[in-house]
Image (tube, rainbow, N blue to C red):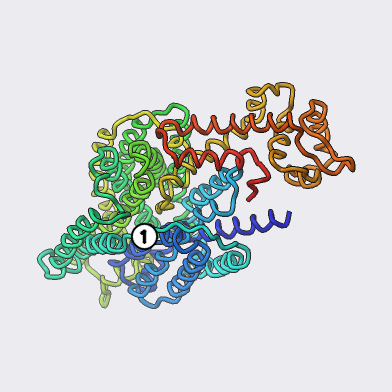
Amino acid sequence: MKQQRGLMLIIIALMLGMLLAALDQTIVSTALPTIVSDLGGLEQLSWVVTGYMLASTVSTPLWGKLGDQYGRKGLFIAAIVIFLIGSALCGLSQTMGQLIAFRSLQGLGGGGLMVLAQAIVGDVVSARDRGKYQGFFGGVFAVSSVIGPLLGGLFVDHLSWHWVFFINLPIGVVALFVIAAVLPGTSKRTKHKIDYAGIVLLGGATSCLVLMTTWGGQTYAWSDPVIIGLIVAAVVMVGLWAFVETRAKEPVLPLHLFKLRVFTMTSLVGFVVGFGMFGALTYLPLFMQVVYGVSATASGLHLLPMMVGTLGMSILSGQLIAKTGKYRIYPILGTAIATVGMFMLSRLTETSSTLTMSIDLLVLGCGLGLVMQVLVIAVQNAVGFEDLGVATSGATFFRSIGGSFGVAVLGSVFTSRLNDDLSQVVATTQLPPGFDPAQVQADPTIIQTLPANLQSEFLHVYADSIAQVFTVATPIMAVAFVLSWFIPEEKLRETTKAVDIGEGLGATSAERNSLAEVERGLVRLADKRLRRDFYVKLGAENGLLDLPPESIWVLTRLQDAGWLMAEELAARADVTRQEGRPYVDRLIEQGLVRRSTDGHSLRLTPQGDVKAEELLQSCRQTLRELVADWGPRPELEQLIDELSPQLLGSPTDRP
């Protein structure tokens, strides 16, 4: 029981760490208008989101490989510390530039939290229980996507925007101390040839391109040496990255994957989906708080239809795919619906009702939800075993980078339209003496204090500028609809059907290797079967029709255990000895188990050993059938040999 309590403490600490990192992708959105009114820098607003996402995305493969090579406990502690330092500095920021820099530091730690938390689960949880805990971690992503904007609004309204970041400190400190005190170090290490050059070049090229789209035509003219320099730097780094990847032993993103139509098309569609989702999340709260004049909390509530639609359709599409084995129709339908949703949002004005906006957001969310889950499934199904891990991380990489570009590009669109509309208002409207229109851009909340006629003018300016964001995003989403038709339909592998909701919604991949990806799917499938009368089916296959599942369970626990204390067996089953005794008695009556003379211990008879081995072989065969579509591979056979006794709960493979 003490061991079980320690495990639960570890799991809770890991979930807290992942929750912090996942929340910080969305919690800031509803606080941005208040942050801008305090720090200024409306034209830099997008980088508060982009800085975090870029840092977490680019650092993901590095955290994963270093964790394999040097041990995950120390690195997870380092990731928490970096994240907490970044959070504290974000809350203390005095300028928008400082906040952006510290958000990037926070994102660096956040990438490690999400990657390493999921990997550590495999180190501390037995295969028998791992499927259940994987579901818990998937739920963390789902919950954070829904409550993030709402929590951000609550902190802004009832405390201050600084608490959007300060709230991480007490939670993170608890996770830090629990992990340091309870998580055991692991001796298992995996040597890697880490592609440092590839990671740096890819991250640098992406950053240059995002800066170019942010600054071009706004801060600098397109012909300005700064913009030209960014373009040249991006092209050079992409060329060097391609050169490096052809020679790296473990490339961060192998170039040959782009020869696969499925990978290329899903990457492009994922890029656009991320573009639309995070672009909408960033600018809709600004619309609600400035144009509608609602509180930050209310703006978070208004976003719920979009997030609930995304979550609900992700779950539904995943279940339908697992049941039918068909997936191609969902990205086609999803991108079509999302395009319609974007178009509906582009029609919003300062006079639109909240009901209209909620319906628009629900449509957009449903469309995004139909796509996000499927892209990972399609990629995993299309690549060979040796590329499974890196292709999965690549699929989520492009969605995350798309989000970074979406926030930056749409931010540039918003700023450009805002400047044009403000200039027009200044030229055609009689302004009060001493009134500086730049104040409206520096602090949008000032609009609510203006005279009624002037207030309506500036509200229209903001409504029109934000609607322009969705006007531009609509044809971009339509491109994704066209591209989705080029994703081919192929027969799904069994383990591919087991992708969980966290993998679909998470903006950062867990950076697992190919064997770990198969194991993840296999454990989830096996967990479902174990909960669906699997012990009864195993018993029926091996001539034990008259035994209840509880007796089959006892039989598998006693295999190779020698004499086992009945008290310990009851504790493992979470029952009293009296409650478990009838099931043991059934085994004794059939000559499969015998009880010690003092009545306190149990062991298998020779006949029981034979039956327990038959049950184990049946379990192995079931697992072989689940991975048969990957072809014969020695590493998969070894994985089955390791997992089978764990899934049946053999005492020789306790966590």
Spot occupied by residue 456 in the image (x, y as percentages of width and height): 31, 59
Spot occupied by residue 137 in the image (x, y as percentages of width and height): 53, 50
Q: Is residue 16 above or below residue 399?
A: below
The number of numbered badges drawn on the structure is 1
The three-letter amino acid code for the residue at tag 1 is Met
Spot occupied by residue 342 in the image (x, y as percentages of width and height): 31, 44
Q: Is there any visible trace of residue 30 in the rendered image?
A: no
For disc 1, the marked residue is 53
Question: At 48% from the left edge and 58% from the top edge, which residue is drawn?
Answer: 189
In the depicted view, which residue is nearer to us: 477 or 9? 9
Q: Is residue 516 above or below residue 54?
A: above
Which secondary structure, mark 1? Answer: helix
In the depicted view, which residue is nearer to us: 195 or 343? 195
Q: Is there any visible trace of residue 54 in the rendered image?
A: yes
Mark 1 surroundings within 10 Å by alpha-carbon count, few (fewer than 14), some (14 through 19), many (20 or more):
many
In the depicted view, which residue is nearer to us: 563 or 444? 563
Spot occupied by residue 235 in the image (x, y as percentages of width and height): 16, 60
Residue 133 lies left or right of residue 23; in this view the side is right
